[in-house]
Structures are given as structure tokens and as C-alpha cells.
Image (spheres, rainbow, N blue to C red):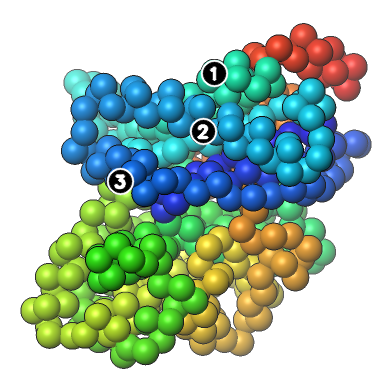
């Protein structure tokens, strides 16, 4: 099947689109990335999404953005198809993560019920109608209904992607939020994965504030590279209760997107320069990743190799800190395994669409805390739905 995977993360910077050839034959999965591109959000849209994520906007705007982002995800699908010089009629499925505007893994009591929730906008029905291609979306909700946190879900893809060659690995993804997947060498051992804390989210927010909006990020970690780590501020940041929480655990912008102003105020109190602040928050990202891995994985398991993906791999200062922390365990990037680090998350949602449509449970209960395996995602039929059902039945 030719499948498009669409992803927009907590950094709110745009839509990642990947076109893949995917096949399963006799239990063997084959993934071939045909094309990948990122389509940036406008600065105006990003501001609206930030306001929505921070609870500053109305239900009317959320409903409007739900449909508007659906149009943008559909447009990204047409663009990636054009880029790969094929046609939409050749596409079998689209898998769309949508844009998270709220993720609350902490249970809230409602009478006798304990509710936790998540909300992604960019409605998959809009994508299906615009493209004519059957679209699968809203993947996290079924896992939450089964008692899980709905995150992280990418470890399912990590497990499918990395070869089982007798090596145990850590897969670290540094997007807006950082998460880790432990893939043991034994096929019988459970996969372990969880969010560790901030990734690029705090760094991007601080870079934008410190440059009055001229910079969207600390490119290559240059600002942090000129500063010195302020140990007292780092200790304050590392005392955050999420960092030491026992897995399963997941988080989002609600926890690590809002305190940028607080961190700036603290830096003024400590009278540290902006470069030192960026160095310290970069160290916070690195230290929170390492501490979580050390406490919950490395203390009990041998790890042969660490694979790092996501936008954070382009931050040279951050990567240097991680290599120093994890030494002597070798660290590589997905490129050394033959994959584009930036494309990994979008590729994951192409696989989720494939397996959900085929009726394959695609959450990992040991990761999310769900009571059982479930088939994630809602199927929104496109014009090709009957053809896809026929293809599915022939495959069985």
C-alpha cells in the first residue's frame, strides 16, 4: 500500500508529511520512504494555536481551527503526492495525527469516574473528503478509553522499525517533548517507553522571547553554546515533579509549554545572561532525558546502542551534552540506520493507518498503561473506501 503519514507536534511549527510504501508479508514488515517534507505553519496560525493550547481562546475558534487544519493537512497530502510525482488516485490510505491542543494524562474525578483526556484537531473527515482517500485519525483516544495515557504511541513504530539483531537499544525522540523507548534484545521482554520531559519546546519559546520573535529556535544550539550552565537554576528545573515521576507517564505543552515566562523571571532573579539561560535550559533537557533513562532503564538493563531522532538532533550543544552523559554507550542518529530523523514521526502515522485499517492492535499496554491492546484510530471513508475494503479482504 502507498500511505501518507501526517504529523504536527507540540512545537506547533508545521505539518510533516511522509509518503511510504508499506507491506506486511508472512509477518515481515517492509517500509520504504518515498518522499518527505515539512510544510510550515504561518506565524499567525502558530499564535492562534498557542493561545488555544494555553486555554486563552473560545470554543468557536477551536471548532474553526479543527476544520481549517483539516484543510491544511489535506493540502499537505496533495503537496507530498505532487513532490513524489505520483497521483492521489494511487494513494491507499492517509494516517493523520492531527494537532494536539490539550493532553491531560492526570485523572480528574467526575463522580465515580476517573477521566483523563487528550484533544487533537485537524479533523480526518475533512482530509478524507478533500483527497478522496480513506483517512485514519484520532489515534490516541482508544488507548485512553482502555485505561492508558494515550501517549507515547510512537514506540509501536520504533519496535517495528529497528532490527531485532541481538542488541538492546534506547530510541530517544526529541521533539517538542522528549520521549524514550527501550527495545530489549529479547523478543519476550516488554517494551518500555515514556515521556521524559521537555525537548525543544522550552528552548524554542525562550529563543523567540529572547530575540523578540526574530528567531524561532536556537539554531544548532549556537546561543546555548556561548553560555555557561547555572547549576542552581538547573537544580530548580530538575526538581519538577514530572521529571521524577515513575512511568507510565506522558506530558505536553500544558506542563512544559507554559513556564517560559517563569524561567525568564527566575533568570533575572539569578542575574544570569540570556546565553547562560539557554545553556542551562539545554542542560535541563539533556539532564531530564538522561536521569529518566538512568533511573528507570539503565539501572536494570544493559543498553548496547542509543538511536536519537527528532528535531533535537540538529542542536549540536544538546547532542554534545547527551553524548557526554551516556558515555560510553554509543549514540547514533536514524540516518545511520537508513532513515531520515525528521521523517520518523510522520512515518509512524502511516504505519498506524495501515495496521488500524487491517484490524491490528497498535498500542503497547506496557508503555501507556492501558488494560489491553486496542486498535487505535477512527476510519473516515474516502471515495476509495470500497476499493480499500476489497484490497483488505483479498489480503486476508
- Front residue of 305 and 337: 337
Q: Residues within 10 Å of mark 3 (few under 14, many from 20)?
A: few
For label 1, the SS is helix
Indicate whether 45 appears above or below 90.
below
Give the image location of residue 257, x and y in percent.
29, 54
Mark 2, residue position: 72
Q: Quadrant of residue 162?
A: bottom right
Indicate whether 64 appears above or below 288.
above
In the image as oriented, which residue stretches furthest toward the top?
Answer: 386
For label 2, the SS is helix
- Front residue of 58 and 242: 58
Give the image location of residue 50, x and y in percent.
30, 45
Question: Which mark, by number, is residue 125?
Answer: 1
* Quadrant in the picture for the C terminus: top right
Along the polypeptide, which appears first: circle 3 or circle 2?
A: 3
For label 3, the SS is helix
Indicate whether 246 appears above or below 30.
below
**Residue 73 appears in view:** yes
- Looking at the image, residue 118 sits to the left or right of residue 277; the answer is right
Mark 3, residue position: 47
**Residue 352 appears in view:** no
Q: Residues within 10 Å of mark 2 (few under 14, many from 20)?
A: some
**Circle nearer the viewer, 1 or 3:** 3
- Looking at the image, residue 205 sits to the left or right of residue 149; the answer is left
Report how far apart the C-alphas of labels 3 and 2 lie in the structure: 16 Å
Residue at horizontal 30 percent and vertical 56 percent from the top: 256
* Quadrant in the picture for the N terminus: top right
Give the image location of residue 323, x and y in percent.
55, 83
Amino acid at each position: 500500500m502507498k500511505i501518507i503519514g501526517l504529523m504536527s507536534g507540540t512545537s506547533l511549527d508545521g505539518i510533516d508529511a511522509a509518503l511510504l510504501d508499506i507491506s506486511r508479508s508472512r509477518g515481515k514488515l517492509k517500509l520504504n520512504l518515498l518522499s518527505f517534507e515539512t510544510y510550515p505553519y504561518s506565524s499567525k496560525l502558530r499564535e492562534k494555536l498557542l493561545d488555544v493550547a494555553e486555554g486563552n481562546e473560545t470554543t468557536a475558534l477551536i471548532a474553526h481551527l479543527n476544520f481549517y487544519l483539516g484543510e491544511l493537512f489535506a493540502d499537505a497530502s496533495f503537496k507530498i503526492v505532487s513532490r513524489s510525482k505520483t497521483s492521489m488516485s494511487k494513494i491507499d490510505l492517509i494516517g493523520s495525527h492531527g494537532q494536539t491542543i490539550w493532553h491531560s494524562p492526570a485523572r480528574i474525578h467526575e463522580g465515580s469516574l476517573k477521566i483523563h483526556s487528550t484533544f487533537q484537531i485537524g479533523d480526518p473527515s475533512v482530509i478524507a473528503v478533500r483527497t478522496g482517500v480513506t483517512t485514519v485519525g484520532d489515534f490516541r483516544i482508544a488507548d485512553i478509553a482502555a485505561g492508558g495515557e494515550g501517549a507515547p504511541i510512537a514506540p509501536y513504530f520504533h519496535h517495528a522499525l529497528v532490527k531485532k539483531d541481538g542488541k538492546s537499544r534506547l530510541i530517544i525522540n526529541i521533539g517538542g517533548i522528549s520521549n524514550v523507548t527501550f527495545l530489549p534484545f529479547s523478543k519476550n521482554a516488554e517494551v518500555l517507553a515514556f515521556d521524559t520531559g521537555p525537548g525543544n519546546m522550552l528552548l524554542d519559546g525562550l529563543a523567540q522571547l529572547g530575540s523578540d520573535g526574530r528567531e524561532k529556535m536556537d539554531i544548532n544550539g549556537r546561543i546555548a553554546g556561548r553560555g555557561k550552565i547555572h547549576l542552581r537554576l538547573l537544580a530548580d528545573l530538575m526538581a519538577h515533579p514530572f521529571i521524577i515521576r515513575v512511568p507510565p507517564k506522558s506530558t505536553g505543552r500544558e506542563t512544559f509549554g507554559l513556564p517560559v515566562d517563569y524561567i525568564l523571571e527566575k533568570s533575572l532573579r539569578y542575574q544570569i545572561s540570556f546565553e547562560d539561560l539557554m545553556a542551562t535550559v539545554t542542560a535541563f533537557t539533556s539532564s531530564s532525558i538522561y536521569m529518566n533513562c538512568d533511573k528507570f532503564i539503565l539501572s536494570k538493563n544493559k543498553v548496547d546502542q542509543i538511536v536519537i531522532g527528532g528535531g533535537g538532533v540538529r542542536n549540536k550543544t544538546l547532542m554534545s551534552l547527551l553524548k557526554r552523559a551516556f558515555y560510553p554507550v554509543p549514540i547514533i542518529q536514524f540516518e545511520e540506520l537508513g532513515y531520515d530523523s525528521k521523517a520518523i514521526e510522520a512515518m509512524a502515522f502511516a504505519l498506524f493507518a495501515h495496521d488500524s485499517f487491517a484490524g491490528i492492535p497498535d498500542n503497547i499496554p506496557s508503555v501507556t498503561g492501558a488494560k489491553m491492546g486496542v486498535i487505535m484510530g477512527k476510519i473516515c471513508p474516502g471515495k476509495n473506501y470500497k476499493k480499500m475494503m476489497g484490497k483488505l479482504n483479498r489480503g486476508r
